[in-house]
Image (spheres, rainbow, N blue to C red):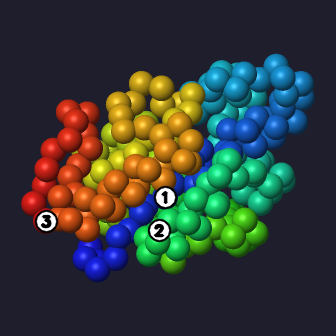
Amino acid sequence: MNKSVFILGVDLDGVVGDFYGAMREVAALWLNRPVNELTENVSFGLDEWDINNFGGYERLHRYAVTQCNLFSNMRPIKDAPSILRKLSGRGIRIRIITNRLFLKYFHRATITQTVDWLDKHDIPYWDICFMNDKGAVGAHVYIDDAPRNIINLRKNGCRTIVFSNSTNRDMPAPKADNWHEVESLVMESLDEWQTGTLGLFGAEGFRAVSA
Ligand SMILES: [Mg+2]
């Protein structure tokens, strides 16, 4: 890991982009149902919208990206772009980490939409990693919303902030309910890193690690 720069590993869907809000609109179209019939209180996989009876999640996802430009049209989560610009301005290296390539045959659309969207919203980053194993990218602190990612990252000793939404209500702290809270938690971590006391957050709480 680069020891001279503090690296923030940032997930996109559900953290920087309003993935569930955008998917809800696409799913209403796909299911031919009024959008207000689809609960906003979803879990990971969107079972609450009864998509399994109509082809399942992968089919909906493919439709969303290839026919509705999901990753171009998604709205940013409130304050995410501006606070990422602030953090970047303080010398923090933003490393985007996303598992958006989990389905084959439309990688070009996914990648193009993603990088255009990041530019359109002036979201600063120096690295972008399309991968499942998020811990392998070597960030000092991560922010993610998917329970499975959070559990895996923490299991591997990676300090991980939960970005709160309906899919991760049961995840232990540290959690951020908005991007102002993300900013505070990241600045605390930066401060610990600069003073050589950066530790790990885990289900058991804080535990120090040697530099
Ligand atoms: Mg996510």
Q: Residues within 10 Å of mark 1 (few under 14, many from 20)?
A: many
Identify the element where label 3 is drawn. Answer: loop
Residue that mark 1 sits on: 10
In percent of the image, x 23 and y 49: which residue is there? 200
Kind of residue at disc 1: Val
Report the residue at 48% width, 49% height from top. Answer: 182
Left or right position of 186 against 15: left
Q: Earlier in the sequence, mark 1 or mark 2?
A: 1
Q: Earlier in the sequence, mark 3 or mark 1?
A: 1
Can see residue 173? yes
> In whole angstroms, how far apart are the C-alphas of marks 3 and 2?
21 Å
Q: Element type at marker 1?
A: strand
Q: Where, by quadrant of the figure, is residue 38 drawn?
A: top right
Residue 66 seen in render: no
Q: CA distance from mark 1 to mark 2?
A: 6 Å
Q: Out of 123 and 52, give the one closest to the viewer.
A: 123
Are dots 1 and 2 in contact, CB under 8 Å? yes
Query: In this rendering, would 156 be left or right of 94?
Result: left
Task: Look at the picture and state if 148 lies above or below 211.
Answer: above
Q: Which residue is mark 2?
A: 95
207 to 114, vertically: above or below: above
- Which amino acid type is shown beneath numbered disc 3? Ala
Q: Position of residue 127 (x, y in %)?
A: 49, 75
Image x and y of residue 10, in percent:
49, 58
Task: Specify few, some or many for label 2: CA neighbours under 10 Å numbering under 14, 14-19, or 20 or more.
Answer: many
| Circle 3 residue | 211
What kind of residue is marked 2? Arg
Return the mark for residue 110. Answer: none
The reply to whether the residue tagged 3 has its Cβ within 8 angstroms of ligand 1 is no
Q: Compared to 162, does 105 lie above or below?
A: below
